């Protein structure tokens, strides 16, 4: 895209917001529809600002000959991207803006900023006000989709003893 260097800062090592701008504006999720990106341990509160910035740039270049993308950056995000971490109510409150299908709970075990040993309590608090379908998506289904987990198989393993129970978080 023309003049991208004037709109976005030079990428900094380890800065996921820079990487997200570049992935979305380059149309990586649109050009590779089966690709999945997960931003782990980042929470969600940074995402609307990135999507707003990218969408603004996208709409401002629609008439330029180099513009070939058909999906907005927000549409690309919802199709291919995830953010996970020890979620707060503020993170979950963004579900309509960034897509409930893009949010996944992660306990960040065993780091000090993680939720263990209070993961179920913290998750239930973060999910207050969500529908049962949203709770299940955020607490299990979205991560299963990102990592290609089979939830039916996992339910028969010892791991099932440690995961959140749907009735405990909805």
Image (spheres, rainbow, N blue to C red):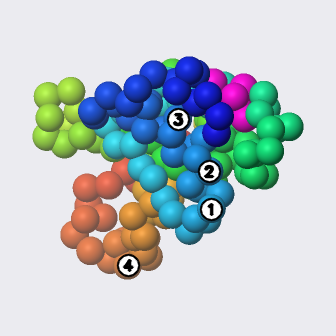
Query: Where does the image place residue 127, in percent across and percent down from the top left?
Result: 51, 34
Q: Earlier in the sequence, mark 2 or mark 4?
A: 2
The label shown at residue 27 is 2
| SS at badge 1 | helix
Residues at badges 1 and 2 in contact (C-beta under 8 Å)? Answer: yes
Judging by the rendered image, the residue that carries numbered circle 1 is 31
Residues rendered magenta in the picture: 53-58
Q: Nearer the viewer, residue 119 or 63?
A: 63
Residue 119 on image: x %, y %: 29, 38
Going 51% across and 63% down the picture, which residue do you hit?
35
Residue 57 magenta: yes
Please give left or right for residue 81 compared with residue 114 in the image: right
Label 4: how many Cα within 10 Å (few below 14, some 14–19, many 20+): few
Viewer-side residue, 137 vs 11: 11
Magenta portion: prevailing SS class: helix
Q: Which quadrant would residue 125 be assigned to in this image?
A: top left
Q: Residue at x 28, y 41 (%)?
A: 107
**Is residue 158 toward the left or the right of residue 61 in the image?**
left
> In the rendered structure, are the residues bearing label 3 and label 4 in contact, judged by CB atoms less than 8 Å apart?
no
Q: Residues within 10 Å of mark 1 (few under 14, many from 20)?
A: few
Going from the N terminus, do you reach mark 3 or mark 4 first? 3
Which residue is painted at 45% across and 53% down in the image? 37
In the rendered structure, which disc, 4 or 1, sits on the residue that comes first in sequence? 1
Q: Work out how far the residue at label 2 is from the one at label 3, CA to CA, in angstroms.
A: 10 Å
As drawn, is 95 to the left or to the right of 47? right
- What number is the disc on residue 153? 4
**Dot 2 and dot 4 residues touching (CB under 8 Å):** no
Q: Distance between the residues labelled 1 and 2?
A: 6 Å
**Residue tagged 3:** 21
């Amino acid at each position: 895209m023309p003049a991208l260097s004037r709109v976005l800062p030079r990428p900094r090592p380890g800065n996921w917001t820079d990487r997200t701008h570049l992935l979305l504006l380059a149309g990586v999720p649109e050009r590779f529809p089966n690709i999945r990106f997960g931003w782990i341990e980042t929470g969600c509160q940074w995402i609307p600002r990135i999507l707003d910035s990218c969408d603004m740039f996208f709409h401002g270049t629609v008439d330029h000959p180099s513009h070939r993308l058909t999906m907005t950056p927000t549409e690309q995000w919802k199709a291919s991207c995830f953010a996970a971490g020890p979620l707060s109510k503020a993170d979950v409150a963004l579900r309509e803006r960034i897509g409930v299908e893009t949010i996944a709970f992660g306990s960040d075990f065993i780091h000090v900023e993680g939720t263990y040993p209070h993961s179920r309590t913290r998750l239930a608090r973060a999910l207050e006000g969500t529908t049962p379908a949203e709770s299940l998506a955020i607490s299990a289904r979205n991560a299963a989709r990102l990592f290609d987990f089979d939830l039916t198989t996992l339910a028969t393993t010892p791991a099932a003893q440690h995961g959140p129970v749907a009735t405990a978080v909805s």
